[in-house]
Image (cartoon, rainbow, N blue to C red):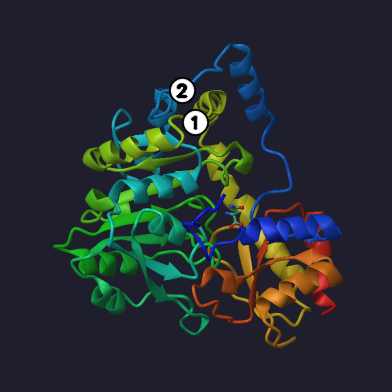
C-alpha cells in the first residue's frame, strides 16, 4: 500500500530519540523532560482507592466536576482569574491534547498562527495538520529570548487566527512579564486573534517571580485558551492529564474537538487529583523543590566551561557550550550521550531552520545524585 504522508518532513520526536539513545548507552538521561523520582505515595493511594471503589469507567467528556471545581478555585485564589467549572474548564489527556484540540477547534484552511521559536515540537504539526500555516518569530540568545512586540504586531493580518505562547517557556525557561502582557494586549486589540497559552510549568517558577498568564490581562481573557497540565506539577507525566480553561463560547468549540480526539480522560486519576489538590501545599511546594534543584545543578557546574543564565522557570537549564567546541549541537548531544554518558536536547530542534546557537537543554527534574554525577562529567569537558 502507498501511504501519502501528511507530515513528510516529520520524524520521531527528539524526546523519544534522545531517551532511547540514553537507554541504549546507559547515559544519565537529562534529555526528555520527566522526573526520575516517584510522585507522592498519597496520590498513588488515592488512585488505588478510587480504582477499588469502581471508578473505572468513562469520566464525563469534560472531566469530573470536583476536579474542575478545585481547578477553578485554585485559579481564582492564585490569579484572581475566574472560570466557571461547569462550562469553562475541560479536562483532557495532557496539555499536548489541549493544544491540538484548540488548534482543531479554531484553525481553518489557510489560517496563520504565530509561533515563537524555539518552539515546543508539537505546536507546528498541530497547526499544519489542521490546515493552518505557522508564521515564525525567531527569538535569540542575543536578545535573551525576549519578544519584540512591534514585530508581532507587524505580522498580524486578516489571516492571523491565533498566537501560541509558552510561559514559563520550554526550552528557555523564560517567563512572560506584565510588560509583555500589556504589549500583547496592544498588539491584538481590535482583532479576532486568539491566544493559546501553554502554562504547564506554571508552578515551577523561580526567584520570587509571579506566574503571569495572558488570561490575567483583563483585555486578553476573552480570547485566551489557557492550557495546563497535572504532570509537571505532581510528578505524573505518564498519567497524561491536563486541562483547558477558556470562556464559554470558546470552550463549547474546544469540547467539540476534544470529544473526537480522546472523548474523556482517565477517571481514577481525576478523582485522585481532585482530593489531592485540596491541600494547596501539594502544588505550591513544587516551586522551592525545583528552585533548589536548579541552584544545586548550577552550583555543581560552577567549575565547568559552560556559560549559562539561570532558568527563570520550568525544569530545564540551557547551557551554552561555545567555549568548549563549535560542533553542531545535534551531533554534540549524540556524541556526549555516547562518550561522556550525559544525554541532553539540542536546542536547534526547536527552530524550523535548525538555528544552531550552540546551546543544549538539560532537564534537572532528576534526583540530586544523578544531577551531581551529570555535572561532574560535564565539568570535565
Ligand atoms: N515536555 C517534555 C520535554 O520537553 C517531553 C514531552 C514528550 O516527550 N513528548 O522534554
Badge 2 or badge 1: first in the primary sequence: 2
Where does residue 96 sit, x and y in percent of width and height? 49, 48
Q: Farthest residue toward the left?
A: 190
Give the percent coordinates (x, y) of residue 230: 53, 40
Residue nearest the observer in this picture, 285 or 249? 249
Whether disc 1's CB lies below 8 Å from ligand 1 is answered: no
Left or right of 50 on screen, residue 107: left
For the residues bearing labels 2 and 1, Cβ distance under 8 angstroms? yes
Residue 89 at what x, y percent from top left?
35, 36
Tally the numbered discs: 2
For mark 1, what is the residue?
Answer: 265
Tell me: residue 241, above or below residue 203.
above
Query: According to the image, label 2 marks what residue?
Result: 59
| SS class, disc 1 | loop
- Can you see residue 183? yes
Using the rendered view, name the quadrant where residue 112 is placed: bottom left
Amino acid at each position: 500500500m502507498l501511504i501519502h504522508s501528511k507530515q513528510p518532513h516529520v520524524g520521531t520526536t527528539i524526546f523519544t530519540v534522545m531517551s532511547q539513545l540514553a537507554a541504549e548507552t546507559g547515559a544519565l538521561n537529562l534529555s526528555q523532560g520527566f522526573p526520575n523520582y516517584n510522585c507522592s505515595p498519597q496520590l498513588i493511594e488515592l488512585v488505588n482507592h478510587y480504582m477499588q471503589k469502581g471508578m473505572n469507567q468513562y469520566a464525563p467528556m469534560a472531566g469530573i466536576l470536583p476536579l474542575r471545581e478545585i481547578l477553578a478555585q485554585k485559579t481564582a485564589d492564585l490569579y484572581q482569574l475566574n472560570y466557571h467549572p461547569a462550562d469553562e474548564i475541560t479536562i483532557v489527556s495532557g496539555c499536548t491534547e489541549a493544544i491540538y484540540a484548540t488548534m482543531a477547534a479554531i484553525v481553518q484552511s489557510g489560517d496563520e498562527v504565530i509561533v515563537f521559536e524555539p518552539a515546543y515540537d508539537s505546536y507546528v504539526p498541530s497547526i499544519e495538520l489542521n490546515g493552518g500555516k505557522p508564521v515564525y518569530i525567531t527569538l535569540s540568545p542575543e536578545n535573551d529570548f525576549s519578544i519584540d512586540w512591534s514585530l508581532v504586531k507587524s505580522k498580524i493580518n486578516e489571516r492571523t487566527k491565533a498566537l501560541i505562547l509558552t510561559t514559563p517557556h520550554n526550552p528557555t525557561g523564560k517567563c512572560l512579564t506584565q510588560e509583555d502582557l500589556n504589549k500583547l494586549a496592544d498588539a491584538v486589540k481590535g482583532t479576532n486573534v486568539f491566544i493559546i497559552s501553554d502554562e504547564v510549568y506554571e508552578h515551577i517558577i523561580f526567584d520570587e517571580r509571579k506566574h503571569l498568564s495572558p488570561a490575567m490581562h483583563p483585555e486578553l481573557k476573552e480570547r485566551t485558551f489557557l492550557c495546563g497540565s497535572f504532570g509537571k506539577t505532581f510528578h505524573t507525566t505518564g498519567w497524561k492529564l491536563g486541562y483547558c480553561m477558556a470562556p464559554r463560547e470558546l470552550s463549547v468549540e474546544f469540547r467539540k474537538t476534544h470529544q473526537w480526539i480522546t472523548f474523556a480522560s482517565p477517571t481514577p486519576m481525576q478523582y485522585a487529583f481532585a482530593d489531592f489538590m485540596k491541600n494547596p501545599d501539594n502544588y505550591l511546594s513544587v516551586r522551592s523543590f525545583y528552585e533548589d534543584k536548579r541552584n544545586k545543578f548550577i552550583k555543581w557546574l560552577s567549575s565547568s566551561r559552560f556559560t549559562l543564565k539561570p532558568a527563570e522557570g520550568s525544569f530545564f537549564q540551557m547551557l551554552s557550550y561555545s567555549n568548549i567546541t563549535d560542533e553542531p549541537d545535534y551531533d554534540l548531544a549524540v556524541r556526549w550521550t555516547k562518550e561522556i554518558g550525559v544525554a541532553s536536547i539540542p536546542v536547534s530542534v526547536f527552530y524550523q531552520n535548525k538555528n544552531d546557537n550552540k546551546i543544549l537543554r538539560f532537564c534537572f527534574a532528576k534526583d540530586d545524585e544523578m544531577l551531581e554525577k551529570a555535572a561532574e562529567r560535564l565539568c570535565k569537558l
